[in-house]
Structures are given as structure tokens and as C-alpha cells.
Amino acid sequence: MARPAKSRTNGRNGNNGATLGFEQTLWQAADKLRNNLDAAEYKHVVLGLIFLKYISDAFEEKHAALVAQQAQGADPEDPDEYRAENVFWVPKEARWSHLRANAKQPTIGKLIDDAMVAIERDNPSLKGVLPKEYNRPALDKQRLGELIDLIGTISMGDAEHRSKDILGRVYEYFLGQFASAEGKKGGQFYTPRCVVRLIVEMIEPFKGRVYDPCCGSSGMFVQSEAFIREHGGKLGDIAIYGQESNPTTWRLAKMNLAIRGIDANLGPEHADSFHRDLHKDLKADFVMANPPFNMSDWGGERLRDDVRWKYGAPPAGNANFAWVQHIIHHLAPNGVAGFVLANGSMSSNTSGEGEIRKRIIEADLVDCMLALPGQLFYSTPIPACLWFLSRNKRDPRFRDRRGETLFIDARKMGVLIDRVHRELTDEEIARIAATYHAWRGEKGAGEYKDVAGFCKSATTEEIAGHGYVLTPGRYVGAEAVEDDGEPFDEKMRRLVSTLAGQMAEGRKLEEDIRKKLRGLGYDI
């Protein structure tokens, strides 16, 4: 495909959230109001209110325009006027102005629940999606009122940066913060933004069908749309298909897409992609996913003869290669996929996994393997990698790479953003993506070269020589060390002299320790 002239990165430093300046302050203020609720519960309280604020703001903007057009026959209270422009109709009792006016009333919890019910009633696409537990006794109504006042401050920007965009970015920032606060459990609904951006930058979903079989809170889709906008495309250039098995996460996904104005087919309800594939006949141009790592209770024993297992039945005790084959099954003839898996998927030979991997490699489907740095994920300390698959390596738009696979080792990349979490920087994402695009031979991407310690293009024969193991470290070799100009003999004499001094110091310390122990009555 032709490469747009615009830069691939957006110029922000860091990728965990937009740098609006007030998100962190907003988060800290909201977190102070959490009281006795844990992050998993509080998440729905806050995100539900942000969503309510978004649809109310969008409604009020359209409402003001219709009021100005009343002389021409416009009716500000006609729901069809809003639906015609893909704006949610918000009934009077659900509008933010009404809720904020009653924020200090003890009945505010019931008013919000009633508002959510009314919005779902008048907007069928939101049926069963919105949280309705604001009136429960455990939720402090005074703090709830304060939270409404706080979220009410998210309304700034001019016509080009309306609250729709700002609210969407705040929503995404809060998703990441809740994932961090929840730890392992939270990571199941949220993939770190830098990882999503890396996948999107590499497979470039400009136009076509995009699919995520385990979509979590829909981060892959949000970043795909952002990528298209940044590169001059328009909303709607891609058709989005997704599925999520967790009912709570499925509702989060629907809200996350709605707040961005993104139309998507996530099915009528939550469902398991293995046992109830809602998009059975879909052949996607792009597949992006972050499946649960090493999933042991996926019900594989009930699917032994499934049509998707073209390369071998996955072990019942680990779903990694069930996900790989499910993704391959849904790829279009020229489709590409990028997805996260645990590092074990690159080398495991247990329960037939090695044989399945071998068949996939011999079918020439593996385009690129990328080893990620540690500490990127909120959900697990397990080291992870990215798989990139291509159905057609002789696509005439690119260089013919049949019989070859690109290996990239990015384990040394990333910067710590706190004690336990790491992020890939914009520059690192750009370097990795540019390497992949150059290797594929994309127009304007420059020439590809192997770089010791970072990237290597290996043949299928080389991979077979390594027992069909796909760990990048096996192929990229050691990083080249720059010659410091010191002659070898001089360097060895200097190092030996330093070592002799350290050994002498060690003997001295050892004798001091012996003396002290003898003084205590212990002789060694």
C-alpha cells in the first residue's frame, strides 16, 4: 500500500494516555472519592458518569443548533433529529444539567439509575450496556454528588476540540488507571496503550474489516480509528467486528466505542469466541488481539474436531494455539494479523504445541516475531511476545518474502513509568514499525538491513535448524560492541591487574571476617 506522508507518531512522549494536562489531577480527585469501594466496583461508577456526560454534551451541542434553526422548522425535542446525525437522544430526566442540579440531593443515586434506564429505553444500541447501581447503599451519596461536580468540569475546548474528544481521552486514561489499580484482574480488560499502538503501527489498518476475537474494552479498535485519522483517513474506512466473553467487559467495550462515535459489531451480547463464534463467516483484512495468556479452562476437550484446527488440535490445557488458529481461520486471503501471546508460545513442545507451530511455519504464515520488554502488562509478569501473521507473502504491493520471517528483539527497550510498569516510547515504536515496513518492502520505507542484537531476516530452513523455535534472541545474535581503540594486550594487562587487586582485597576481607568470628568463639 502507498505510505502516507504524515509521520507515524503523534509526537506525544509516553503512550499510556493523552497528555491533556488535567487527566492526572482529575484521576487523583476522583480516586479520593472512592471511599470504601474497590477499584473494580468504582470503575463502573466513574466510567458510567463520564459516558453520561459525553452523550449529554453531544446532545446539548446538537440541541443548541436545532434551537437556532427553529425558524426553519427544526424541532429540538424530536429524537429523530438527533438519530439522523448519529447523536444519542437524551430524555430530559437524563440530561447532565438536570443531574448536576440535583447532585446534592440524597436521591441522586436513584436519579442516575433512572437516567441510565431512560437512555437505554430510547437508544436500543445501548440496551443492557449502562451501569445502574448508583442507588445502592454502599455508594456514599455525598461523594457521588462530588464526583458529578468533578466530572462536570470536563467541558472545555473550542469547536475543533469539543468535549467529545476530551471525554474520550479522559475515558481511555481512566481505563488504564483502573487496570493498574486492579492489578492482575484489571489487565484482562485493558491492553497497555503502547502495545496496542505498536500493533496498529505495524499492520496499518487503513481500510477494510478489522477483527478482535477477545476485544476487552475495545482498545485495539479505538487506536485503529485514531491511526486512520492521523494519516488522513476518515471514520468508517474500517468495519469493526469484535467479541468479548466477559459480560462486564463487553459493556465497557460498547461504552468505550460509543464515547468515540465508533460503529462496531460486537454481537448482541457477550459470548465465548471458541464455543459461540458470533462472526463465524467473517474473513478479516486485519486481526488484532491480546488473548488471555496460557488459558487452561477454555473447554478444548469439547472442540477436538473443530474446523478451525487446520494445523492440529490445541491441547485442552492451554488455549494459546487455539487462539492462533482461530485468528488464522478468520484471516482474508491477503489478511494480516498482529497479536500478543506468552513467550512460551514461541518454543513450547508440550502437548503437541511444537508440531502445530511447525506446521504453521511450514505453511509460511509467520511474517514477524517480536520479543517485548518485561513489565508492560498490568495483568501478568509473564514475558510476552507479538506474533505477526500474513496470509499472502507474495502480495504484489510488497516485496516477495516467501520462505522468510523477520525477528525483532525489543527486550531492552522501554522506560519505567513507575516501580512496576514499563512503556515503549514513541521513538521505539517508530523504530520497530519502520524496521518491519522496510523488511516488507513498502513504498517509501527505505532499505532493510539486519542489525545484530535487534533484527534478523531468517529463512524457513534456518528456523527448522533451530527446531522451529521462534524466539528472536536465537536469530538476531549479540549486539555489536563498538571498538574502543585500546589494543588487546594492553586491555588484558589492565583487566588482569584490576582483577588481582580485587582478589587481594577479597582475601583481606575474608581474613577480617575470620578474626571477628574467632573473637566470638567460632573458628572456620
Image (cartoon, rainbow, N blue to C red):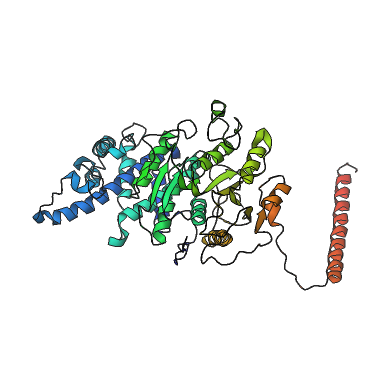
Q: Is residue 52 left or right of residue 82?
A: right
The image shows residue 468 at horizontal and vertical percentages of 68, 45
Q: Nearer the viewer, residue 226 or 313?
A: 313
In the image, residue 58 above or below residue 485: above
Could you tell me which quadrant the C terminus lies in?
top right
The image shows residue 11 at horizontal and vertical percentages of 46, 64
The image shows residue 353 at horizontal and vertical percentages of 64, 37
Q: Is residue 230 left or right of residue 109?
A: right
Q: Which residue: 53% across, 33% down?
A: 307
In the image, residue 306 above or below residue 486: above
Q: In this view of the protein, can residue 28 be seen by the observer?
A: no
Q: Which residue: 44% across, 66% down?
A: 6
State the residue lying farthest toward the right.
Answer: 523
Quarter of the image holding residue 226? bottom left
State the residue lying farthest toward the left.
Answer: 71
Quarter of the image holding residue 113? top left
Q: Is residue 92 left or right of residue 419?
A: left
The image shows residue 84 at horizontal and vertical percentages of 22, 48
Tally the numbered discs.
0
Q: Nearer the viewer, residue 486 or 237?
A: 237
Q: Which residue: 33% across, 32% down?
A: 136
Q: In this view of the protein, can residue 306 be seen by the observer?
A: yes
